Image (spheres, grey):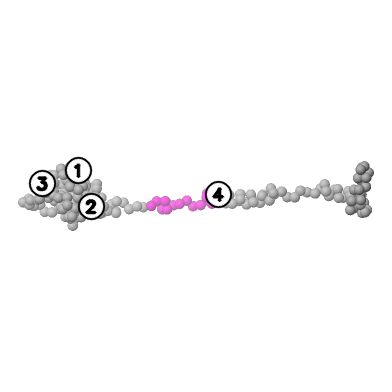
Amino acid sequence: MTDDDLRDRMRRADPAAALAPLPPDRVARLLEETVSVTAPPTRRRVLLPVLAAAAVLLLAGAGWLILRPSPTATNLMIAYPSASAAAPPRHLTAPAEQRSAKCRPPEASRLTTTADFAFAGTVTGIDARHVVTLSVTKVYRGDPASQVLVDQTGDSSETMMGSGRFEIGKSYLIASAAGTVLICGYSGEAGTPGLLDLYEEAF
């Protein structure tokens, strides 16, 4: 098949072959419109409003963080009750001195069943009325306490272990029942042989 035959076949297959050719001015106008067609908006133009809105939100949030009122000291500080407020001084009464009284050896089982309050403490003061102030270092039994006030006993070694009386600066182990100090080997100086072992066994 020659080129001429191919051109004839293409002319016969062209559906617009029977149409009249366009005027030159129409052809020129179509060419101009084809060249001057603008491209459709890109995705970048669509994203611009979204990015602008996000920037506005970020600026608003930053401004709120900067301008918001700072927490007051009342909100930041929590008051906790002090030990003295939670545990007021406990008052004990020492029994009257009985020089003729004889005591049987102390027993841990009796201390366990009799004492409702027992503690270790150091004497920090003795006033003119012979009221002794002890700073509590450990509570073996009973409610917590930071200080205990107790009348000073006599000087009989049978009533309180050790020297028989309270002295400033010394440490003691004291047990009581119904507000009365237990004597006869159940209260005394902490360093008295066997007294600490008695407390550890009883409590």
Determine which of the numbered discs, if any, sits on residue 189 in the image: none
Disc 2 versus disc 1: distance between alpha carbons?
A: 23 Å
Query: Residue 18: x and y, percent?
Result: 93, 54
Provide the secondary structure element on which disc 1 rests.
Answer: loop
Q: Which sits earlier in the primary sequence, circle 3 or circle 4? A: 4
Q: Nearer the viewer, mark 2 or mark 3?
A: 2
Front one among 145 and 109: 109
Front one among 195 and 47: 195
| Residue position for label 1 | 169
Residue 102 seen: yes
Q: Which sits earlier in the primary sequence, circle 2 or circle 1? A: 2
Provide the secondary structure element on which disc 2 rests.
Answer: strand
Disc 2 versus disc 3: distance between alpha carbons?
A: 25 Å
In the rendered structure, which amino acid carries the disc numbered 2? Arg
- The residue positioned 24% from the left and 48% from the top of the image is 138
- Asked if the magenta segment contains residue 187, the reply would be no
In the rendered structure, which amino acid carries the disc numbered 3? Ser
In the rendered structure, which amino acid carries the disc numbered 4? Ala
Q: Which sits earlier in the primary sequence, circle 2 or circle 4? A: 4
In the image, is 125 to the left or to the right of 26? left
Q: Which residues are magenta?
A: 64-78
| Residue position for label 4 | 62
Provide the secondary structure element on which disc 4 rests.
Answer: helix
Provide the secondary structure element on which disc 3 rests.
Answer: loop
Crowd band around label 1 with a 10 angstrom C-alpha radius: few (<14), some (14–19), many (20+): few
Front one among 139 and 56: 139
Task: List the single residue furthest toward the left.
Answer: 100
Q: Nearer the viewer, mark 3 or mark 4?
A: 3
| Residue position for label 2 | 141
Disc 3 versus disc 4: distance between alpha carbons?
A: 78 Å
| Residue position for label 3 | 157
